[in-house]
Amino acid sequence: MFKPVSKRIALTATAIVIVLAVVIVSRRSVGKAAETPEPTPDVAVKFGKIVRTTLHAYVTGFGTVGPEPAIGRRSPASAKIGSPVSGLLAVSHAVEGQRVAEGTTLFQLDSRVADVQVEKARQAVEFAQTAFDRQKNLLGVDGTSKKLYQEAEQQLQAAKYELANANAQRALLSIQAPIGGTIVHVNAKPGDAIDLTTPLAEIVDLDRLVVAAKIRSSDVSALRLGQKAEVSPGTPDSNEAKEHPPSIATATISYIGADVDSANDTVTIRASLPPSAGLRPGQFVNLRVLTGEHRGVLAVPVEGVITDVGSSAASIAVVKDGVGLRQPVKLGIRDGGLVEVRGQDIQEDTIIVTTGAYGLPDHTKVRQANP
């Protein structure tokens, strides 16, 4: 009667053993799987090299072209033309783009009333001259008194004064160029009513232009009067990180401001352009002044420099055995697309990550991206 019970106990024990074996095997499999890490994929980047080269230090700024202001006894290189008297514009000889000499008549106001006054004053002088000559002849033969002679002389002088005044008033109606230069704006046409506030034209001497530029206050100490500055075309949204465009003129620094604009921490400088520089007033340009040269330094492409947000620390990703390793560096001057680097174990021709370096984790496998 005990045999069926013993048989059941044996079967139960066997089942328990089998279950325990399965559990043990499963745990070992899971442990091995956890111990084996998944392979890390390579990151596609672009490579570059540390190069030895010569870099130049520049002070850069931006500004606009304009006429040279008055300096000492030298008159300004621009003039806005107005009328000294009110009247009706009768004739205009001013044409935009026309080059004129100083003293050239540009505008003529209606002079009919003034012409009448001049003629009237001229006739009065003739009459007074005749009366004076008569008194003078009579005085020579005692035919008149000294008093009448003097009165005739005074009347002649008064008539001449009135004629001179009438001629001066008529001359004001003829408006001339105060300086030699090019007419850049004409704002009036024949038939317009002109008063003392009406702008007629503007003249600029295009051979006396300057660039008024804004320079960071921290860079001003590197500038000196007489230094040469490369001038290149620009736009108000120019990005200094872009490669400097080819220069179109070489200017000479003629003025360095003494005060700092607190709104943007800049100082105004002026650089005089050579005659016939090909630039025009109002044109926006970039200015670059060579202030130093570093020969035989190590440099990397700008895109290969890694900087942390809110920190001045910098590093590069050196490639060793297919792995990108971050290496701290100190940055020097920047010239075009290269920046000077210094640091321990920084060597020429070392392969580094350029495009893709920013945000690349340290000790990451890398490979050359397809072109």
Image: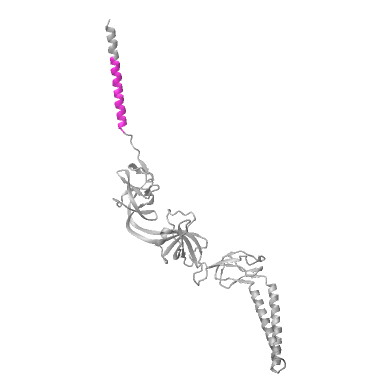
Where's residue 138, x and y in %?
A: 71, 92
Q: Is residue 287 visible?
A: yes
Q: Is residue 253 above or below residue 32?
A: below
Residue lying furthest bottom in this view?
A: 141
Where's residue 281, x and y in %?
A: 52, 63
Q: Quadrant of residue 40?
A: top left
Where's residue 276, x and y in %?
A: 49, 66
Where's residue 136, x and y in %?
A: 69, 90
Q: Is residue 364 left or right of residue 262?
A: left
| Quadrant containing the N terminus in the rendered view | top left
Magenta stretch contains residue 276:
no
Here the colouring is: one colour
Q: Is residue 238 above or below residue 319?
A: below
Q: Image point 29% across, 11% down: which residue?
A: 8
Q: Image point 67% across, 81% down: which residue?
A: 158
Read off the magenta span. Answer: 13-36
Q: Quadrant of residue 58?
A: bottom left
Q: Is residue 91 left or right of residue 350?
A: right
Q: Nearer the viewer, residue 328 or 283?
A: 328
Q: Is residue 232 visible?
A: no
State whether the magenta stretch is mostly helix, strand or loop.
helix
Magenta stretch contains residue 23:
yes
Q: Is residue 237 above or below residue 129?
A: above
Residue lying furthest right in this view?
A: 143
Q: Is residue 158 left or right of residue 252?
A: right
